[in-house]
Amino acid sequence: MFKSATAKLTLWYFGIIMAISLIFSFMIYQITNHEVGARIEHYQTQVDRPSASGILRVLDPNDSLVTSEREAASQNTLMLLFYINIVVLGSGGLASYYFAKRTLRPIEAAHEAQARFTSDASHELRTPLTTMRTELELTLRDPDATKEDLREILQSNLEEVDKLSNLSRMLLDLSRLDYGKLELKPVDLGKLTQETIDGMHLPKGRIKFDGKTDHIAVADRVAIGEVVSILIDNAVKYSPAKSVVNVKVTGDKHRAKLTVTNGGEGIPPESLPHIFERFYRADSSRTSSKTPGFGLGLALAKQIVDLHDGEIIASSRPGKTTSFTVLLPKLR
């Protein structure tokens, strides 16, 4: 589809370039011919001044020399314009193809991303739905199912419903970020991080926070709070149960900086470039059944940070530590 669109767009660009080139060539040819004719006429009247006898000698306009010179000038002009149009033809064709590809590249990338996103979302939705249906069918076919069995099935289905609710919420958040606007205001990143940690109700001693309250970023408070929550939640999930997650807020004159570091298996080097892609999850150590998630959190965090003209960086030493750093513009 995009190859055909590229070819059509190239032809349109090429046609416009050639039409402009031919129009200008015709205008230049006409102007040149008119100028040559005017110069020859002027030259004809200036060849000889009046002689002593008072007779003005003027060249004959139909003189063979005048005619040949005029034809030679016209021919030379046509040849020059022909070569110029050949150059325009070649360079215009290449430029048309380049700009056609460049024009369609973002659309093609968006189309591929949308197709991949739809496929991944369908897969993630299908898994819990299939689990719920299987459990319900088995229970309905079992005539000896007890009240305790039914309670267990309902509890399991409730967990799957929670998963679907979380997935729907994250998909909705991503959709809103695609088309919504943020309310950028001065936000104390240190204070916001502390409030987010307090609101997560994590086990005591699980988080070690080091941050000052004088790093004021220009940000949407709710959106950045979501980023902080996502990074801390990921760090807790993918680190040993009793390990400490270090959260630090620092900054310089221009940017406020949030760093979340945890121990654990880490992220393989080959996975680092992809961890911010939607539905991407790294190796099996980070995608085991004991670690719930859909691979949307980091994609959501990156999109939020990008909308703030900020930067999010991931680094990892497999088997040791993993760090996520968020840089946000400060209030000046």
Image (cartoon, grey):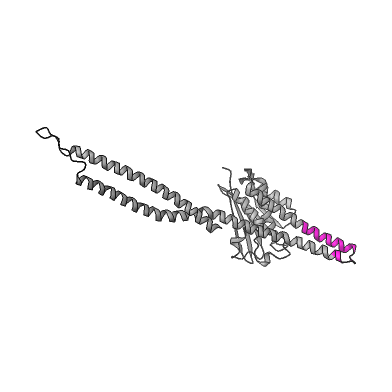
Residue 193 screen position, x and y as percent? 67, 50
- Name the residue: 66% across, 50% down: 175
Extreme-front residue of the structure: 62
- Image quadrant for the C terminus? top right
Residue 48 screen position, x and y as percent? 15, 38
Residue 27 found in image quarter: top left
Is residue 127 among the parts visible in the rendering? yes
Magenta part, dominant SS: helix
Residue 35 against residue 294 in the figure, above or below:
above
Residue 47 against residue 192 in the figure, above or below:
above
Please indicate whether residue 100 sits to the left or right of residue 67 in the image: right
- Name the residue: 17% across, 38% down: 58
Is residue 313 among the parts visible in the rendering? no
Residue 33 screen position, x and y as percent? 29, 44
> Which is nearer the eye, 210 or 121?
121
> Which is nearer the eye, 80 or 205?
80
Residue 13 screen position, x and y as percent? 47, 51
Bounds of the magenta span?
A: 139-161
Q: Is residue 159 magenta?
A: yes
Extreme-top residue of the structure: 54
Number of marks present in the image shown: 0
Residue 87 found in image quarter: bottom left
Please indicate whether residue 72 sits to the left or right of residue 246 in the image: left
Q: Is residue 105 magenta?
A: no
- Image quadrant for the N terminus? bottom right
- Name the residue: 39% across, 48% down: 22
> Which is nearer the eye, 328 or 153?
153
